[in-house]
């Protein structure tokens, strides 16, 4: 791709919080550009972007989708991204592939934590943005009031380029502040006509244009000097300053319209190509030398060695795997070998595909800036770097989205466990936010994700794509047991059954250690009372026995075991005998060392609107939580707290209910702490009942 061709390329993400009409805008942009013959609609299940059955059913975007279109000699890749918290991992993964964003805003000015997160995630990549206030045909809007909370929350300047003419049922167009005219719509979709500014809006339009000139003039010293001298700027001068300030993230230009009626859609396309940068004008993500790990300077040009980031994977049970990548530098053709520097393997790129929703179109090559796909790469996964083997680099990006909720997953058919595990591995390739583990204690398959809806959608995909039906259950809390005092006991194993017997004799002392210390084994045997070859068997016996405590069968932690005495038999002693003796001595000591139950304590950061803070803190107190502090962030309050894991296994739906969907939280393990006696009694009782039930079933 020549430099002039790359200058005419735009990779634009449609971003924002859930429910503001992002996908409808994306469909409208494709239709307005003539890339589709019909207008896709999410409410009718005909969107070009939301094609998965789970998306059509819920009318929300679950997975990002890409559509390539052309507009006025420019090539644009529209990337429609999820906006609900459960699926933001996909949005975060797309950001390194973008050169700019269009933030879709609510006419009512509501700002949720999802929008704040996307904006903060975009900062390391320096992504400029436009804003589009949509759905003006449905909802009432006072533009200045709607934009203020957005600017306050994001810490950004929002610069209106248009004013709505009417809102709700009376919405009929907008005032173009650059051209100082109105654009009115009636009848056919998206066909606006220029007219004079309505009398009732002339004064406010004049004031808004004055503010526009003041704000944009700061972006260019020469234009600022001219504005201060003459007090007026031409549309071209405003456009020049707008372009410069937008690309430097000094401000966010704001457009208005309605995707359903096509109002302002052509203006949005025009703004994308005139105000937003090409991939060449936006810095590349950090790249490291694959051999030394040192930072590498690489320009986003076709003349550089090839490097591409795989930012999304789509797996179809029938069509196979599709790896979607953004070419960061250099170029590649079809049927060539490239190097996956992340995995350290070679891959062959067959046919290169351009993305048009759920369809693909073959192209002959992909050059710096392009977003394309390739099928059936064997070892490549989301987040991997493909590059020239002679100049290997690894693209360093932050993919992490912490899991907020976990469920135990049980196949309905007992024979489906291996099938379910394999299917989950494939879904993990598609979705970096999905985590699958095997609980070593319970042997349960644990599925974790950012929210309950995310896990439920995963279960639906398991059934639809791989024919595996499963049941979701709350996972077992990983309790632990420990001791509070020291104790010393003998463990002696003696067995005579004719012929050679078994003999092992140990004296063991258990001592409590500080929380989080784990397990220590100390050998204090002197004089050969226990031969050296049997000492490892003693430690092994204790390690095996500590996997199941005496209170509720949970692992025992944070103690020191000292082997200080014992005896042996010259004929009957063996490693097995000493292992059993050590296990017996350990269990005897536990009885005397005041065993207690420990529970995992999670650190939580909960973002809630001001008016919900009291309810949320009260709820945390009822869950045995300890509030560590509260910090104001825009119109939100961020509560830091520590709460027992057992109390927040299903916190996501409860928080959603308390905050009407406006709250969000992150959670991670912090430490173990002693379970209060009344709670411990209940946990021990339930554990014993479960063990007895398993025994009755013969498990």
Image (cartoon, grey):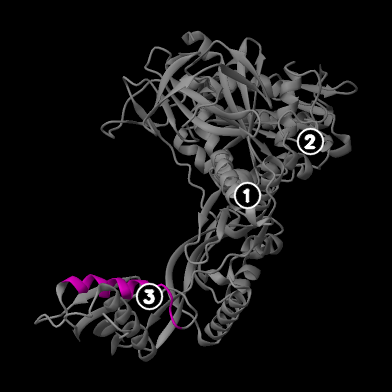
Q: CA distance from mark 3 to mark 2?
A: 56 Å
Instruction: Please say if 436 is above or below 128.
Output: below
| Crowding at mark 3 (Cα within 10 Å: few <14, some 14-19, many 20+) | many
Residue 247, position in %: x, y?
51, 26
Label whose residue precedes the other's in the sequence (3 or 2):
2
Q: Are marks 3 and 2 in contact (CB under 8 Å)?
A: no
Q: Is residue 289 magenta?
A: no
Residue drawn at (66%, 59%), measured in percent from left and top?
472
Instruction: Please say if 159 is above or below 473.
Output: above
Q: Visible in this render: residue 234?
A: no
- Residue lying at the far right in this picture: please name it: 187
Label whose residue precedes the other's in the sequence (2 or 1):
2
Q: Are marks 2 and 1 in contact (CB under 8 Å)?
A: no
Label 1 or label 3, whichever lies nearer to me, is 3
Q: Are marks 1 and 3 in contact (CB under 8 Å)?
A: no
Secondary structure, mark 2, is helix
Label whose residue precedes the other's in the sequence (1 or 3):
1
As rendered, which of 184 and 598 lies closer to the eye? 598
Residue 345, position in %: x, y?
38, 29
Q: Which residue is mark 3?
A: 546
Residue drawn at (41%, 72%), measured in percent from left and top?
547
Marking on residue 476: none
Q: CA distance from mark 2 to mark 1?
A: 19 Å
Instruction: Determine whether, in the image, residue 575 is placed left or right of residue 157.
Output: left
Quarter of the figure with residue 531: bottom left
């Amino acid at each position: 791709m020549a430099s002039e061709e790359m200058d005419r390329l735009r990779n634009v993400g449609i971003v924002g919080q859930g429910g503001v009409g992002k996908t409808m805008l994306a469909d409208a942009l494709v239709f307005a550009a003539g890339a589709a013959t019909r207008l896709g609609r999410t409410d009718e299940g005909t969107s070009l972007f939301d094609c998965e059955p789970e998306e059509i059913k819920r009318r929300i975007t679950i997975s990002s989708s890409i559509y390539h279109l052309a507009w006025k000699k420019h090539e644009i890749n529209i990337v429609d991204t999820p906006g609900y918290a459960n699926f933001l991992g996909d949005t975060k993964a797309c950001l390194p592939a973008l050169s700019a964003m269009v933030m879709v805003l609510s006419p009512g000015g509501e700002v949720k934590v999802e929008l704040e997160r996307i904006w903060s995630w975009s900062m390391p990549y320096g992504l400029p943005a436009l804003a589009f206030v949509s759905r003006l045909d449905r909802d009432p809007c006072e533009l200045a009031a709607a934009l203020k909370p957005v600017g306050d929350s994001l810490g950004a300047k929002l610069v209106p380029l248009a004013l709505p003419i009417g809102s709700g049922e009376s919405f009929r167009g907008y005032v173009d502040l650059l051209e100082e005219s109105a654009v009115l719509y009636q009848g056919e979709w998206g066909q606006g006509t220029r007219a004079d500014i309505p009398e009732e809006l002339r004064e406010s339009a004049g004031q808004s244009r004055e503010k526009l000139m003041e704000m944009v003039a700061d972006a260019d010293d020469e234009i600022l000097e001219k504005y201060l001298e003459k007090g007026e700027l031409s549309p071209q001068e405003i456009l020049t300053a707008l372009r410069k300030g937008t690309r430097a993230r000094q401000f966010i230009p704001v457009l208005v319209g309605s995707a359903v009626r096509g109002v302002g859609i052509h203006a949005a396309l025009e703004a994308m190509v005139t105000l937003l940068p090409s991939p060449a004008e936006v810095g590349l993500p950090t790249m490291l030398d694959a051999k030394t790990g040192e930072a590498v300077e690489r320009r986003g040009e076709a003349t550089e060695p090839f490097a591409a980031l795989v930012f999304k994977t789509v797996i179809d049970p029938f069509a196979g795997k599709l790896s979607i990548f953004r070419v960061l530098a250099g170029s590649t053709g079809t049927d060539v070998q490239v190097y996956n520097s992340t995995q350290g393997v070679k891959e062959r790129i067959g046919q290169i595909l351009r993305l048009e929703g759920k369809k693909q179109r073959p192209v002959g090559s992909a050059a710096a800036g392009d977003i394309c796909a390739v099928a059936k790469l064997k070892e490549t996964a989301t987040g991997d770097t493909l590059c020239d083997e002679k100049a290997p680099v690894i693209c360093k990006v932050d993919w992490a989205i912490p899991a907020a909720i976990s469920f135990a997953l049980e196949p309905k058919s007992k024979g489906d466990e291996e099938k379910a595990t394999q299917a989950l591995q494939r879904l993990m390739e598609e979705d970096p936010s999905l985590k699958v583990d095997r609980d070593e204690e319970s042997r349960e398959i644990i599925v974790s994700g950012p929210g309950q809806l995310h896990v439920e959608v995963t279960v639906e995909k398991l059934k639809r794509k791989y024919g595996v039906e499963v049941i979701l259950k709350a996972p077992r809390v990983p309790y632990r047991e420990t001791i509070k005092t020291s104790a010393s006991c003998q463990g002696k194993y003696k067995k005579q059954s004719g012929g050679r017997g078994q003999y092992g004799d140990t004296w063991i002392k258990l001592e409590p250690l500080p929380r989080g210390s784990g397990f220590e084994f100390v050998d204090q045997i002197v004089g050969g009372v226990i031969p050296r070859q049997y000492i490892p068997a003693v430690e092994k016996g204790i390690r095996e026995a500590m996997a199941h405590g005496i209170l509720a069968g949970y692992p025992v932690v944070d103690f020191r075991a000292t082997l200080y005495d014992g005896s042996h038999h010259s004929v009957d002693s063996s490693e097995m005998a000493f292992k059993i003796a050590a296990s017996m001595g350990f269990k005897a000591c536990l009885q005397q060392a005041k065993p207690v139950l420990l529970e995992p304590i999670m650190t939580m950061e909960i973002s809630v609107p001001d008016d919900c803070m009291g309810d949320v803190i009260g709820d945390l107190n009822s869950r045995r939580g300890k509030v560590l502090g509260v910090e104001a962030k825009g119109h939100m309050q961020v509560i830091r707290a520590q709460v027992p894991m057992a109390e927040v296994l299903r916190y996501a739906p409860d928080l959603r209910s308390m905050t009407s969907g406006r709250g969000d939280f992150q959670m991670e393990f912090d430490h173990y702490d002693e379970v209060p006696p009344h709670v411990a009694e209940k946990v021990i009782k339930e554990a014993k009942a479960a063990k007895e039930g398993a025994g009755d079933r013969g498990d």
